[in-house]
Image (spheres, rainbow, N blue to C red):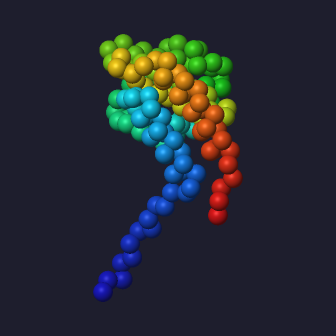
Amino acid sequence: MSDVTAPPRFVPSEKQLALFRAVEDIHDLTQAITVLLVDGSGDLVAASGDEDDVPATLRAVLGGKQLAEAGSVRVLLEDVDLAGAPVNVTVYDVDGTHVLAILFDAEADLATVQQVGAEAKVMLAEILAAPLES
């Protein structure tokens, strides 16, 4: 027998699981390439899809603080160069502290992406506002 103990396993909270499930549902419903939920600092909270498909110029501006400073999604994305990237993006403010980004291509239906995104930002805000269970 060895005295070496296994490192502690990461066990996600119910809130984290709910956020991951929600982001996966958004990904499926929109037929998106990638869906990201980031916090105020731009740190990833949940993702579905391949994060490598997110252009670095877009990833650099995603964050609740950056969106608050910009004042609108339009201003936030003004200087983002997506030339050569085969993606469209729609970005939503979630509860004033998080950002939801849905990256999609021409095969996705824009109306569906917008409808799902608008509903998703409300749902994600509710999950984020829910008290942590012990």
Residue in the image at 42% along x and 25% along y: 103
Query: Image point 57% across, 14% down: which residue?
Result: 74
| Residue 27 in which image quadrant | top left
Q: Quadrant of residue 122?
A: top right
Q: Quadrant of residue 82?
A: top left
Q: Nearer the viewer, residue 93 or 64?
A: 93
Residue 104 x %, y %: 40, 23
Q: Quadrant of the N terminus?
A: bottom left
- Height in image: 17 above or below 10? above
Whether residue 113 sits left or right of residue 3 in the image: it is: right
80 to 34, vertically: above or below? above
Please state which of residues 117 and 34 is positioned toward the viewer in this rendering. 117
Q: Is residue 99 visible?
A: no
Expressed as whole percent of the image width and height from the top left, the position of residue 110 reads 46, 18
* x and y, in percent, of residue 88 in the image: 42, 18
Residue at image x 60%, y 39%?
124
Residue 53 or residue 78, whichever sits in front: 53
Q: Check the picture and name the quadrant holding the C terminus.
A: bottom right
Q: Nearer the viewer, residue 16 or 28?
A: 28
